[in-house]
Image (tube, helix red, strand yellow):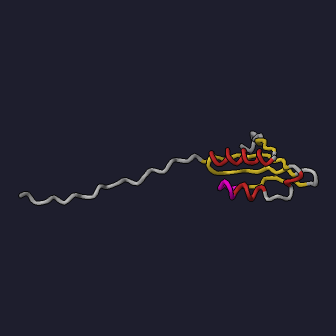
Amino acid sequence: MPAKVKKKGVRRLPKKRARTEKGRQRLWLMYPPKHITSPIVWELITRFELMANIRQAEVRDEIGIVCLELEGERASLKKATQWLDRKGVKVEPVEINVIDG
């Protein structure tokens, strides 16, 4: 009888992680009066795992305007802008100055 051959374990390659594309957006956010005191930016960056840089902001009793630079996965950026829209925050892209790049 032939000797039993020891089977070697099957070597498995690590699963490839889905490649996620990073992106950056500069946006103007216009808050309605009911959201001026809400922590919208904080909720946005924690909910969608984004990095934020407030470039400019002005808050008054009747409106809040924020220029926000967001960085993260492209899918998260898209979901974040949709979420802002549903919240009633008007979102517009910042036109980039030729000198700024």
Residue positioned most to the right? 61
Magenta region: which residues? 46-51
38 or 4: nearer the eye?
4
Seen at 48% across and 51% down, the residue is: 17
Left or right of 48 in this view: 39: right
Left or right of 27 in this view: 64: right
Residue positioned most to the front? 1
Number of numbered discs on residues: 0
Quarter occupied by residue 1: bottom left
41 or 85: nearer the eye?
85
Magenta span contains residue 30: no
Seen at 69% across and 58% down, the residue is: 46
Q: Position of residue 29 (x, y in %)?
A: 80, 48
Q: Position of residue 20 (x, y in %)?
A: 55, 47
Placement of the C terminus among the 4 image quadrants: top right
Left or right of 23 in this view: 33: right
- Above or below, comparing residue 6 to residue 74 in the picture: below
Quarter occupied by residue 2: bottom left
Seen at 52% across and 47% down, the residue is: 19
- Above or below, comparing residue 57 to residue 81 in the picture: below
Magenta span contains residue 48: yes
Q: Position of residue 22 (x, y in %)?
A: 60, 48
Seen at 78% across and 44% down, the residue is: 91
93 or 7: nearer the eye?
7
